Image (cartoon, grey):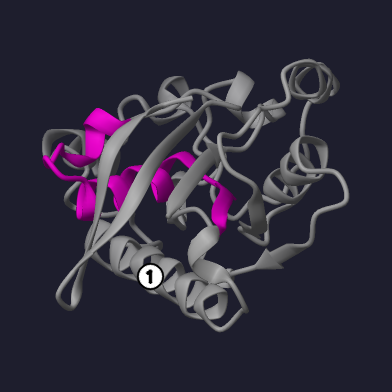
Amino acid sequence: MKVYFIRHGETPGNLEHRYVGRTDEGLLDASKEALSERKVRFGEPVDRIYVSPMKRCLQTAAILFPGLPQVVIEDLRECDFGDFEYRNYAELSGNLDYQAFIDSFGQSGFPGGEDLKSFQERCVKGFLQALSDHQGREGWQERSLAFVVHGGTVMTLFDRFSKPHRSFYEWQLGNGEGLCATLDREGDGLSFTGCGPF
């Protein structure tokens, strides 16, 4: 089964290189136009679209997949950046907590927000919830799935399931970009093979 993952289009906070987690802002008009101009063509029919509950993902999915049902999965939302929320590097420069975060390569977590491990566990839980929902539908094996989510969510899932494995930061996507993979079952486990951009 093919799975497609798309990072939402660009928001004002993305344009200013801010940590946009729980801030529920919509897409820039220019991003809406860009997404409309380059709607993605898929190799197989997409059955359902699973989305983060954030406005930027809902809007992106509606542009790329007009008329297809969206299923909101709460656990697919972006990381809670805590005290760093909606701030950028320039605003955080000199902040000791931020320097500790940088020095730990992001492992220390966000003060007042989520740590990386908790965020990743939540994203995997949300993905497995979507698979469970899909597998309950008739003819599910012949259909592909699309996920319109956040950069951190995509990075987490490919870090967890990619085979051969590539680590979290190797799966970064720009706004509106996507990755596809074949979802394989190995005993009780799952893996993404044939991973690449589309």
167 magenta-colored? yes
**Residue 128: percent from left, percent from top:** 40, 73
Q: Is residue 124 above or below residue 171?
A: below
**Residue 166: percent from left, percent from top:** 15, 37
Describe residue 138's horizontal placement relative to residue 67 as left or right: left
Describe residue 51's horizontal placement relative to residue 123 as left or right: right
The one nearer the camera, 39 or 85, is 39
Which residue is under mark 1? Answer: 122
Dot 1, crowdedness within 10 Å: few (<14), some or many (≥20)? many
- Taking the spot 88% from the left edge, 51% from the top edge, the residue there is 67
- Taking the spot 62% from the left edge, 19% from the top edge, the residue there is 15
Picture quadrant where residue 134 is located: bottom right
- Taking the spot 56% from the left edge, 84% from the top edge, the residue there is 136
Which quadrant of the rendered structure holds the N terminus? bottom left
- Taking the spot 82% from the left edge, 23% from the top edge, the residue there is 36
Describe residue 125's horizontal placement relative to residue 118 as left or right: right
Q: Is residue 38 above or below residue 185?
A: above
- Residue furthest out toward the bottom: 136
**Residue 111: percent from left, percent from top:** 33, 57
User: Range of the magenta residues?
Assistant: 143-171
Total numbered circles:
1
**Residue 12: percent from left, percent from top:** 70, 27
The one nearer the camera, 29 or 134, is 134
Picture quadrant where residue 164 is located: top left
Q: Mark 1 belongs to which amino acid?
A: Arg
The one nearer the camera, 39 or 34, is 39
- Label 1, secondary structure: give it: helix
36 magenta-colored? no
The one nearer the camera, 89 or 64, is 64
